[in-house]
Image: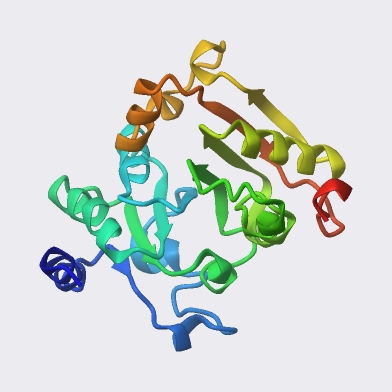
Amino acid sequence: MGKNKLIRFAENETFGNIFQPSFSEVFGIDYHMKGKWHAEYFKNSNPIVIELGCGKGEYTVGMARVNPDKNYIGFDIKGARLWRGAKTAVEENLGNVAFIRNRIENILSFFEPGEVSEIWITFPDPQLKSARALKRLTSSRFLNRYKQLLKPGGVVHLKTDSQELHEYTKSVLEHNSLKVNYCTNDLYNSNLSNPFLSIKTFYEQQFLEQSKTITYLNFELNRVDPIQEPPSEE
């Protein structure tokens, strides 16, 4: 393990805005902060927005800067990456930011039903091989988890450079008759105007320099029955 990683891991332990529970603290059981984010961490009742696979936390921090009247939680397994976002939030005194270091598969251990208002998924691994479809963060496997923690009318945002992931997600939504609020396969040539969509991470800047097109989906999980995979993906 590199020296820089060890330094970052050690500094992470000093940050009050990063939560790093062990496997035994969340596997099959509730984390102690579940249902308590408003009261015990943010100290307000503002809506909670989470970013999944947040990496260095650039998007999480960017959204927190844009809107101080919402609370933002970045979720990722890589502690050395989270260090950057956590440190920036501390340096800028952003009290509406937190980070969780854990696997997204365990997300139900962290939030009560209805505790989350929005979910952002920005530039995730598209997992293009069909055999890995259920590893996609917009697969039925994950959407059924998100559905449990989102409040009624809560939305999911998917921003990606992968046209394949964009089309796959559209097929899941259509197959399950889920409500789509916005959909574009070319975000920066669309008529959508939203300051959150203008936030660009280091990697997105690279994608744009490579002339990649950025796609965007905004949808709701308005289905009582379990969400299913499209037949072509089963």
Q: Position of residue 141 (x, y in %)?
A: 71, 61
The front one of 218 and 160 is: 160
The reply, left or right, for residue 219 in relation to residue 73 is: right
Q: Position of residue 232 (x, y in %)?
A: 85, 47
The reply, left or right, for residue 15 in relation to residue 35 is: left
Q: Position of residue 97 (x, y in %)?
A: 32, 52
Report the quarter where the N terminus lies: bottom left
Q: Quadrant of residue 217?
A: top right
**Which residue ends up furthest to the bottom in the rendered image?**
24
Q: Position of residue 115 (x, y in %)?
A: 56, 59
Which colour assignment does the render follow? rainbow
Q: Quadrant of residue 78?
A: bottom left
Numbered marks: total: 0
| Residue depicted at x 40% and y 49% | 71
Report the quarter where the C terminus lies: bottom right
The reply, left or right, for residue 121 in relation to residue 134 is: left
| Residue depicted at x 55% and y 67% | 107
| Residue depicted at x 34% and y 21% | 209
The front one of 172 and 149 is: 172
Q: Is residue 115 above or below residue 118?
A: below
Q: Is residue 73 above or below residue 167?
A: below
The front one of 117 and 124 is: 124
Q: Is residue 133 above or below residue 182?
A: below
The reply, left or right, for residue 36 in relation to residue 145 is: left
Q: Quadrant of residue 64?
A: top left
